[in-house]
Amino acid sequence: MRLLLATRNVHKLREFARLAERAGVPALAVDALPDDVVLPPENGATFAENALGKARAAAAATGRVAIADDSGIEAAALGGRPGVRSARYAGEHASDAENLAKLLREAPVGSPLAYVCALAYVDPASGEERLFEERCTGTLAAEPRGGRGFGYDPAFLPDDGAPDRTMAQLSDAEKDAISHRGRAVRALLAWLPSLRS
């Protein structure tokens, strides 16, 4: 089976392929978004709105089954911010380091965090749409640690992980087993019509 993933991000494509293989679906192929397809801006109020908007646009433009995700981090002490603005928390063109530094300045050490991933599936032929939303909870570390992962991983201490290790200190396999995106991809793969027996 081939799916169109509404992204041109090679890291996200590789991660999805790795998650599919770990879920026991190595034959699933994931294609990148063609260069001529324009996705809508991520200005929805929720992760689900943004993911569905991207999947619908990709499916309409190509006529193919498309999937898209939107994800980010929510800090309980900040009323759920940065939320859908996670990638732009410190400004429209902010780096991962700048976004993380802002979160560390604004949220108390040890306060609850949650990574959220909304993964949308759109089949333009049947009109079927599905949404899978998963979370990974944790707390804010006192300072960044670890060289793996990206975004807020260096300061995210997962509740399901080894004590006192940030997401950026976990191996790919350890992170995939507990991450919000790993959980959402496994839910999608368990549901996919062509993979159900």
Image (cartoon, rainbow, N blue to C red):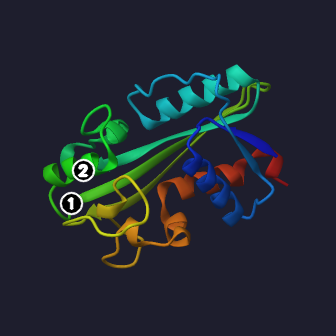
User: In the orientation shown, which residue stands out farthest toward the bottom?
Assistant: 163
From this view, report whether residue 64 is shown above or below residue 180.
above
Residue at 56% from the left image edge and 71% from the top image edge: 173
Can you identify the residue that label 2 sits on? Answer: 76
Mark 1 neighbour class, 10 Å CA radius: few under 14, some 14 to 19, many 20 or more:
some
Q: Quadrant of residue 66?
A: top right
Query: Label 1 sits on what residue type?
Result: Ser
**Rendered location of residue 135, percent (x, y):** 44, 54
User: In the orientation shown, which residue stands out farthest toward the right?
Assistant: 197
Relative placement, left or right, of 74 versus 40 is left
Q: Which mark is residue 111?
A: 1
* Sequence-wise first label, 2 or 1: 2
Q: CA distance from mark 2 to mark 1?
A: 7 Å
Labels 2 and 1 touching (C-beta < 8 A):
yes
State the residue in front, 191 or 21: 21
Relative placement, left or right, of 137 versus 124 is left
**Rendered location of residue 138, percent (x, y):** 33, 63
Residue at 68% from the left image edge and 30% from the top image edge: 34
Query: Label 2 sits on what residue type?
Result: Ala
